[in-house]
Amino acid sequence: MAGTSTDAYDGQLFRSDNIQGSAMVLRFPQILLLTRLVAIPVGAVGGVLLLFGFLSVFEFHDHLELSFLEPGLAFSLLAMILSVPLLRYRSALKQRMAPLFALLAWVMVGLCAAIPITLVTGVSFSQAVFESFSALTTTGATVLSGLDDMSPTFLMYRQFLQWLGGLGVVVFVVAILPHLDAGGMKLLKAEVPGPSKDEKLISRTRKTAHALWGIYLLITIFCAIAYHLVGLSWFDAIAHSFSTVSTGGFSTHDASLGFYRSEWVYLVSDLFMLLGAINFALHFAFYRERRLRLFWENEETRTFLIIVLVLSLLVFLVLPHAQSFTVELKALNHAFFILISFITSTGFGAENFTQWPNAALFLLLIGSYLGGCAGSTAGGSKILRIVILFKLVRREIRRLVHPRGVFAVRYQGRPVQDSIVRNTLAFFFFMLLMNVILVGLMMIDGLDLWTAITAVTACINVLGPAFGTLANNFQPLDAFGLDVLTFAMVLGRLEYLTLLVLFIPQYWRR
């Protein structure tokens, strides 16, 4: 989960050792703290790999244990070497360290998690890294084919990576480190999606992270049970619950959820994709108050559900002109399923939807850029930003009509802080800028305009499916194209500013 504004990074990370301030030296205690923090997710990956090594031996019996146990042991040992000698160092966490840690944590986890992928499948390391980051950022784009014939250990590993990345690597670190309450919220702000990052579920940061994971796990369990009740095996039900609630979109089949050809499977997926795309603070409030009306009373969630309804109906109206669905109700169900899959950035597919009319595909792309709610597992711009931007435009129009009037941008009946408005405008500026740059790079790499646009859209919105020559998967791309799109996934997952602030020279100065 991601995103911060550049004016949030106060404190000192570096000091100048000369009068001009040109020599930047990272303070030693902060190097130690950063090293120890990064060791935690590396050790977590090691633990995950050991777990799947044991599952291969005792549960799935598919002889992949060495592909998981060997790197698992190596990463666990590395984490111990990096962290144990540094336990006595308790340097205060500087807020401007948060984006640097967020990036380092994601990069280290993505690289480590890629090792078993290349060992099991034999793909190049660039392809394995792409697949790993696609899983952890919950993008769902893939370079693999023949999933139906792959080993169950590897398939479940891919699905679990998406679930682990759904709430974010940083949220995991904050949840397990007891001494981070004082600075943990600074880390959470670097990863939680949306323009407003000051809301806690509970007074203490670590308990907030625990509450997030508890809600996440509970929804996942209900999702797995629901999938099993509509006909999926327990293996597929658990695997798809991981990628549904995380809004990731990976599947154990090349045909995705279309493999089951079940309208009930689509309906279950609709429900839990929507739950994953709604602010988890609302889920926590519902858990406490037991009032469904809470969701409708929230302006962002209400707007999100209305947009889902309107766009789904528009897609449905487009389909009959070019599709031969025998039952209109089935067509409506498919329209809702694919639209929800796109707007929540899940990316599940069904029955050759890439062959739908261009008008329908255009509506799907619009949905992917809108995204889900802030504080959820979904990607995209976040509906809260769309609401603020719309109200900002409306305010400026009213000022033209009434030059002397005083108009405030309000959300949930309260004025929106200027810092949030600035963050929202900066977000959309960088979103447009980076989309143009990345599309240009993909065209330089040989893609046509339509394929380049949809590939960047798929990765920067952590969506998954693309159109054009990449409609099936991302195998045709060379190493350069894969690296560009891997960067796009991390950029979109951390919501632009958290990552781009590291490229500003002032960030590295006192």
Image: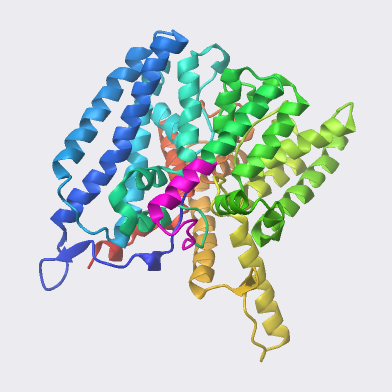
Toward the viewer: 347 or 219?
219
| Above or below for 209 versus 505 | above
| Above or below for 18 versus 124 | below
Q: Is residue 246 visible?
A: no
Q: Is residue 206 magenta?
A: yes
Q: Is residue 8 magenta?
A: no
| Above or below for 389 versus 276 | below
Q: Position of residue 1 (x, y in %)?
A: 47, 48
Residue 143 appears left or right of 341: left
Q: How many marks?
A: 0
Q: Quadrant of the C terminus?
A: bottom left
Extreme bottom residue here? 404
Q: Position of residue 374 (x, y in %)?
A: 56, 54
Quadrant housing residue 507: bottom left
Residue 221 appears left or right of 419: right
The magenta segment is 197-215
Residue 305 appears left or right of 78: right
Q: Position of residue 103 (x, y in %)?
A: 35, 47
| Above or below for 331 versus 287 | above
Q: Is residue 278 visible?
A: yes
Toward the viewer: 457 or 498?
498
Q: Position of residue 132 (x, y in %)?
A: 43, 31
Residue drawn 45% across the image and 30% down it: 131
Extreme front residue here? 289
